[in-house]
Amino acid sequence: MSDKRKLTKDEKKLMREIFWSSFMLEASYNYERQQALGYSIGMWPAIKRYYKNEKDRAEALERHMNIFNTTPHVVTTITGVATALEKEASENPSFDKKIINNVKIGLMGPFAGIGDSLFWGTLRIIAVGIGLSLAQQGSILGPILFLLLFNVPHMLVRYYGGVFGYKFGTKIMDQANNSGIMQKISKGATIVGLMVIGAMTASMVKLESSLVFTIGDEKIPMQEYLDQIFPLLLPLLYTILMFYLLKKGMKPTTILLVTIAIGIIGSLIGII
Amino acid sequence: MQTALIVGIILALLWFIEKMLGTPMVIRPIVVSTIIGAALGDVQTGLLVGATLELVFMGFIQVGGAVPPDVLVGAGLGTAYAIIGNNGAEVALALALPIALLAQSIKVLVFIIRSWFMDYAMKLAKAANIKGMINLNVGGLLLHCALYFVVGFVAILFGSNAVEAFVNNIPDAIMNGLEVAGGLLPAVGFALLLLPMMKKTNVLYFLLGFSLLAYMNIPILGITLFGVVLAFIIVYEFGGKNGGDQDTTDKEDEEELFDV
């Protein structure tokens, strides 16, 4: 089951080739086939290794021109799996080549889900959180640190994801389903992501009431009372309201414009 | 003229890097504004504008096929206009948003044009012409970069004066309001991030992260670590129906997966 064997020298070379060919995935992103062209090019190291005549190579390239879309940072894991399948297909004439695309389609959805929440939702947010405070202080380290914090894990996942996908090859789907790995990673990533976004919301969304009630001679600033109940209550409520409106199908751009209007009008009449 | 060239080249170049190197996030405002700032001789303003815009554009990411407002053009031009006119982050924000919304259509246009290329790509694949496929792939990217160059160049060359006149006429009260709105806008970004993730069953994790910061002021990295530990406990210790009785091979597989 679990493939603990070391890769051969030639396989390591293949892994490096897959890594380097994976970067152009979205160069020609389009509506018709999304990332297909980039993906097919990314399969070339495997195709040229396993198929020696032109007809087979053409057939394989064409096979991978099927519509494809996943999170770019995790694509090599799928390339790795497909590489193992192509190897099998090239050695075993009775292997049904339709399986290759079926497995790819089965993987690209879950990987897009995990990849988006890990890379866009969590890693990027952490990198922003750390880079931002430095940038706000005017330090050039801010953007540099942001890029490093994002891209070091990005490169590691890009390379080792390929190795991992290749090793698991045909068995990954069975195993993934048996032990529910996909669901577990997805659930874990969601928990971390939600907590990080929660923390970022608290630290970055700014909304304070400048209302002051006057009862008798006493002036009561609204914000002080709110802080005693729940600090940062207003940013929290506003974010949840935004979430609710999006959920109801309101367009993000409309909400942005409304938010700007609220900011301007609110500060003009002096409530925030 | 020179400034317009520089801005155009930066936009085209950053997009080229972004899509040739597997989306390494060089088109995020925190990077774009800093580079524009450095090129136009005001790194400090670039950094501050970048920090402000990064928050506002937080939720604008391309996930799936939907095209978000164009962060690169919005941040790039917004920062350039702010620096050229000696203005601050509020002006950059006021300009970057509408520009990003307008520029959205550049991507839509490119995605449509490149759809036409796909017939040709299929022909190349059928001929096993990998060199042709790579050239076409890079060609499609260069087309996009060229459009960004033209947009950046034209917008700065012909737009700077008009924009400056417009900005100088914005009343102070509106500028204050924009500052308030700047603090509020990240809420939209975070809500967009939450949209595919948060459900009734897991809303408490969001609240937990929020409260840890609101009440205890724990740094974000610390909250992330708590999150990782908590996720591990919940997924593995209380890991649902098959959590307790997995055989050892499965566990090894999972550990290997986490090593990745």
Image (tube, grey):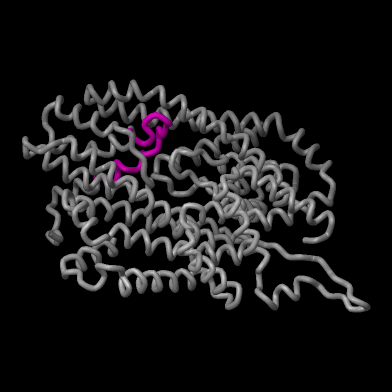
**Residue B237 is drawn in which quadrant?**
bottom left
- Residue A159 placement (x, y as % from top left): 29, 52
Task: Locate residue A19, reporting x and y percent.
Answer: 28, 47
A185 sits to left or right of B159:
left
Q: Is residue A91 or residue A253 the one in the foreground? A: A253
Q: Which residue lies furthest to the right in this view?
A: A217
Query: x%, y% of residue A259?
Result: 69, 50
Residue drawn where x is 54% and y is 47% of the image? B60
Residue A145 seen: no
Could you say which quadrant of the image residue A104 lies in?
top left
Quarter of the picture containing the C terminus of chain A is bottom right
Question: Quick check: can you spot residue A245?
Answer: yes
- Left/right of residue A210 with respect to residue A12 in the rendered view: right
Q: Which residue is drawn at 33% across and 32% down?
A: A37
| Side (left or right) of B111 relative to B130 | right
Magenta residues (range): A17-36
- In the picture, residue B250 is in which quadrant? bottom left
Q: Residue at x 14, y 55 (%)?
A: A7
Magenta run includes residue A32: yes
**Please, is residue B226 above or below residue A103 in the view?**
below
